[in-house]
Image (cartoon, grey):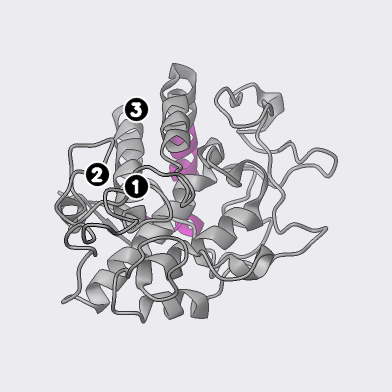
Amino acid sequence: MAYTRKDVSTLTRTEKRRFVDALLALKRSGEYDEFVRLHIDYYVSDGEKKLRTAHMAPSFLPWHRRFLLDLENALRRVDSSVTVPYWDWTKDRSTTGAPWTDDLLGGTGRRSDHRVTTGPFAHATGNWPIRVNVVSTSFLTRNLGRPADPLALPTRSDVTWALDDPVYDTSPWDSTVRTGFRNKLEGWGSGSGSVSWRNHNRVHRWVGGAMVGGASVNDPVFWLHHAFVDLQWTRWQARHSSHRYLPAAQPAQGSAQRGRIVARHEKLPPWNVTPDQLDDVGGIYRYA
């Protein structure tokens, strides 16, 4: 029977506590840090001449769908009542409301070094040491909204702009494409700086701190953010039911992208699963 992922703003006190407790249990066991390590390993950019699966590629959405499922399954082994909630950043846009409350994720970091000092993941609790990172910081950091250089969260119209595109992805299948649902949602835009960050990417930058870069999994909000991104994929699928993941096959011989992206029926590393097999997860979970 399918379970339900809920809007984080609707969670009861007990649901929040059980979600946090399950995350802390994975952290104590060391299993959580393996999720951080995996995301770092698969954060491959356009400029690297090897297979891209997690970012800047068509498989951005199925890769993170499977990644979320793995984390959710680990949480549910700790507590079968737990599911990953989603953060609707088009609606909950405050730096002090959901999910940034003391009984869930805690708030922003202090001004001097962006260290998070409130909530269960604050450094002072000793419950959330950062052991796997791409920088030397050993504590969770955030800079919600970037007060020194303000950045706004994406709006509902930004998401609609992506959802309205009926084509899943287009050539050259990377961060430079300007049409197609995948990159409009992932958010690699033209230009530089804040104007080039759309939807998913802009949220990472808005949170700041640990959420910027390959080690973004160190902030538990990563999962709530990506659950909302995954929800948008389910909405796109419902809206454009005759359209599917692209490319259906590898680019032609001689293409710079041949062998650097995953086609619909090819295995999606590091799992023995294809994007096509992750297309329909309605029998596993649904969104409230």
User: Which residue carries the number 2 mark?
Assistant: 268
Secondary structure of the residue carrying tag 2 is loop
Q: Earlier in the sequence, mark 2 or mark 1?
A: 1
Mark 3 is surrounded, within 10 Å at the Cα level, by few (under 14), some (14 to 19) or many (20 or more) other residues, namely some
Q: Is residue 49 magenta?
A: no
User: Which residue carries the number 1 mark?
Assistant: 53
Q: Nearer the viewer, mark 1 or mark 3?
A: 1
Can residue 11 be seen by looking at this rendering? no
Where residue 117 sits in the image (x, y, percent)?
A: 73, 36
Q: Is residue 2 above or below residue 248?
A: above
Q: Characterize the magenta stretch by its predominant secondary structure.
A: helix
Q: Earlier in the sequence, mark 3 or mark 2?
A: 3
The magenta region covers 6-22
Dot 2 amino acid type: Leu
* Distance (Cα) linking label 2 and label 1: 7 Å
Q: Is residue 14 magenta?
A: yes
* Distance (Cα) linking label 1 and label 3: 29 Å
Where residue 147 sits in the image (x, y, percent)?
A: 79, 58
Q: Nearer the viewer, residue 236 or 170?
A: 170
Residue at 71% from the left image edge and 25% from the top image edge:
124
Q: Are marks 2 and 1 in contact (CB under 8 Å)?
A: yes
Q: Nearer the viewer, residue 271 or 87?
A: 271
